[in-house]
Amino acid sequence: MEKHEIIADVLRNNRETIAPVVKPGVQPDDIVAMDFSDNNEELKKIDIDDIQGFTKYIESLLDDFKKVGVGGYGEDRSIYRRSSLFDGEGEPRSIHLGLDIWVQAGTKVYAPLDAKVHSFAYNETYGDYGGTIILEHNLEEVTFYTLYGHLSKDSLDNMEAGKSIAKEEHFANIGTVEENGQWPPHLHFQLITDMLDKQGDFYGVAPPSEKEKYFKLCPNPYRILKIE
């Protein structure tokens, strides 16, 4: 059995004990499935390079954040064309490897499981994560990682590698457009099986030709994500 399958089993076994990553306080009917692929005709009508216009589009979908947007794992996204960060070497990266939670800037982020800080960084390139924290978890003697991107810059103030973070502990906040890589406010949440010696960063978007490799490195984190 490959590691991503082992982790899936462990998370399935512990599903009921995993804590919510965010607590937006909305009803299930107020969760909106987001679509940032070429299938979204409405998205083609806006200029995604205009961050104010892009943010207003998100706000309109979510009724000024009275609702919460969720989705994106495995989606082939057109929105990454706005940044040269995703140009890749010969092939643009467009396959999203995390789940996004579209909520207001300042929304609190909580640890879903006991953890220690693996690494953190402020990835400030246009289109990047902005504030980024990666937590290391060990459950049933299996080690895996969760990445939190587009955080506020001050979420990193008291971070240090190896620091213990308890399950349900508030450890970060969603960043503003100005500090989150120039994106409408949201959390990029990603499950990682192997950090490949990376620190404070990990590909959140893969080239289409390598998506199966990256799906094993970054399986769907839906078993962790809970929204009350």
Image (cartoon, rainbow, N blue to C red):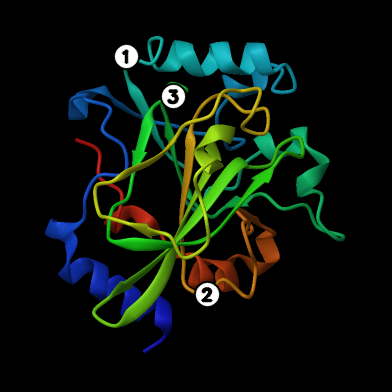
Left or right: 133 as drawn, with respect to 86: left
Measure the C-alpha gap from mark 3 to mark 1: 14 Å
The label number, if any, that marks residue 194 in the structure image: 2
The label number, if any, that marks residue 66 in the structure image: 1
Which element is circle 1 on? loop
- Residue at the (64%, 74%) spot, across then down: 197
- Observer-nearest of 215 and 85: 85
Q: Nearer the viewer, mark 2 or mark 1?
A: 2
Q: Is residue 101 above or below residue 135?
A: above
Q: Nearer the viewer, mark 3 or mark 2?
A: 3
Which element is circle 3 on? loop
Label 2 or label 1, whichever comes before in sequence order: 1
Measure the C-alpha gap from mark 3 to mark 2: 29 Å
Q: Nearer the viewer, mark 3 or mark 1?
A: 3
Dot 2, crowdedness within 10 Å: few (<14), some or many (≥20)? some
Which element is circle 2 on? loop
The answer to whether mark 3 and mark 2 are in CB contact below 8 A is no
The residue positioned farthest toward the bottom in the image shown: 1
Q: Is residue 123 above or below residue 41?
A: below
- Residue at the (76%, 32%) spot, across then down: 82
Residue type pointed to by label 1: Lys
Label 3 or label 1, whichever comes before in sequence order: 1
Q: Residue 40 in the image: x percent, y percent? A: 55, 29
- Residue at the (46%, 11%) spot, across then down: 60
Q: Residue 169 in the image: x percent, y percent? A: 28, 46
The label number, if any, that marks residue 106 in the structure image: 3
